[in-house]
Image (tube, grey):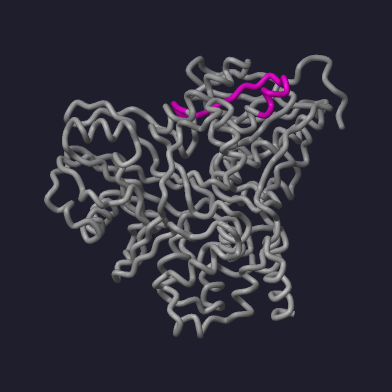
Amino acid sequence: MAPAPTRTPRVAVVGAGIAGLSAARALTERGVEVEVLEREEGWGGRLRGWETRLADGSTVTMSRGFHAFFRQYYNLRDLLAHADPDLSGLVPLTDYPLAHASGAADRFSGLPRTPPWNAFALAATSRSFTLRALADVNVPAALRLLDVEVPDVYRRLDHLSARDLLETVRFPPDARHLAFEVFGRSFFAAPEDLSAAEMAVMFHIYFLGSSEGLVFDVPRSPFPQALWDPLVERLSGAGARFRRKTRVERIVPSADAEGATVHWTGPEGDRSARFDGVVLATEPGGLRRLVADSPALGDEEWRSRASASPSAPPFLVSRYWLDRPVRPHRQAFLGTAGHPTLDNVSVLERYEDESAAWSRRTGGSVVELHAYALPQGCDLATERASLWKQALSVYPELRSARIVDARHELREDCSLFPPGGFERRCAVTTPDPWLVVAGDHVRVDLPVALMERAATTGVLAANALLTRWGRRGHAVWSVPRRGRFAPLRALSGLLSG
């Protein structure tokens, strides 16, 4: 532990996404001076939103797409509760329907909440798990999927891809393509490019490790209004300082190894300041750039890991404002499979107040399409035309709708979790004790993923700095590291041993 500074420690948090805001909240609550440096105009990182004006004169909020806030996201929900104690900004969606291009369909409502009966009930009630198909399942391999222990599961399965695992288990084809690949692609990657361990951890989180199941919430308003503006206002009131449209150019360690000078460019021009700690809460591309531009950070091994942090393939979000409603029975969210690129369809007026108000005023609908894991170098015009054509086969009533306006976001800045990548991930701590890393790409030996991993690593990064200065850290929560049903674990060990 370093000696406590004679003054209040100052920390620069680079990035105001979930990880950065999580770290800022944890540090601010312990009396640390926090300065958050965000390159974009708004907060929330990949969940940020921004105003845009439609062809009909309406001012609306565009974002980078639908996100599900699952009930197992304990640390993320704790972050949001800092400014919204009752989580009134979230509303529940009670179902998670899936539809395959072949006509097969499944849903996750009405399942028991207690593990492992939730998983058994899914298999028993799903039309994808027929008795004939279940007879072909590789039971020992399937039981290994059901017996997850973190981080040991990465040692056992990380060398395989999610597709390898599903083929080894011999899951029924409909279940494999409809359910598991839909889940897998939520990591913005095709199953062959996703670690089997990540797939197993995800199954553990949603089924055998928790009783919350696949029920999730969504923001009742656009992301800025529902989530980030209240949180940033609360943190600002507690003393945190936020700079937007500010790009961190480089970080130079201090000669005494007790901090660093951070150089940035923003609305006020080129600036720099010394900090006692730095949290790198950027996406992988931002981390790679900062490491390249800050040659004195870390040691050779750490720099190699950080420089190799992989980004997922491009993804596309297309949002359409239409002059007529979709059919009344359409769900707020539909996961899709079996299409060339269409991964899900959302009807925003079913849950978001801004879209609902636009729909009431115009009689139309706001429909959003997602395409994950697009080819490198893909063309936006080609992909958005293809995505719309695929959506017409899912919701045929779109054919008769006139497009009032549309917005399209083609991005390539999500994290990738390839087979064999776990051991090469950056951890929260670094060779420089004043420098920590947070984000969904960061290794943490807990069963967390996606937004929850970002929130969790933000707290852990703050804790590492707080411990260094003799200040109390914060608790983090997760589902159990192991499956909660001992007989299944014993049977798995017997059959695989």
Q: For this view, does 476 lie left or right of residue 213?
A: right
Q: Quadrant of the N terminus?
A: top right
Q: For this view, does 478 lie left or right of residue 63?
A: right
Whether residue 407 is visible, yes or no, is: yes
Q: Quadrant of the C terminus?
A: bottom right
Q: For this view, does 229 lie left or right of residue 328?
A: right
Q: Report the label total.
A: 0
> Residue 109 in the image: x percent, y percent?
43, 57
Classify residue 226 by image quadrant. top left
Whether residue 296 is visible, yes or no, is: no
Q: Nearer the viewer, residue 86 or 473?
A: 86
Q: For this view, does 240 lie left or right of residue 302?
A: left
Residue visible at 69% across and 49% down in the picture: 444
> Residue 386 in the image: x percent, y percent?
25, 57
Considering only vertical position in the picture, is 117 above or below 69? below
Based on the picture, tell me whether residue 436 belongs to the magenta stretch: no
> Residue 198 in the image: x percent, y percent?
59, 60
Q: Nearer the viewer, residue 209 or 197?
A: 209
Based on the picture, tell me whether residue 39 belongs to the magenta stretch: yes
Classify residue 96 by image quadrant. bottom left
Q: Nearer the viewer, residue 209 or 187?
A: 209
Q: Nearer the viewer, residue 290 or 228?
A: 228
> Residue 133 in the image: x percent, y percent?
45, 82
Residue visible at 69% across and 40% down in the picture: 476
Considering only vertical position in the picture, is 222 above or below 205? above
Classify residue 468 by image quadrant. top right
Residue visible at 55% across and 51% down in the picture: 212
In the image, the segment drawn in magenta is 26-42
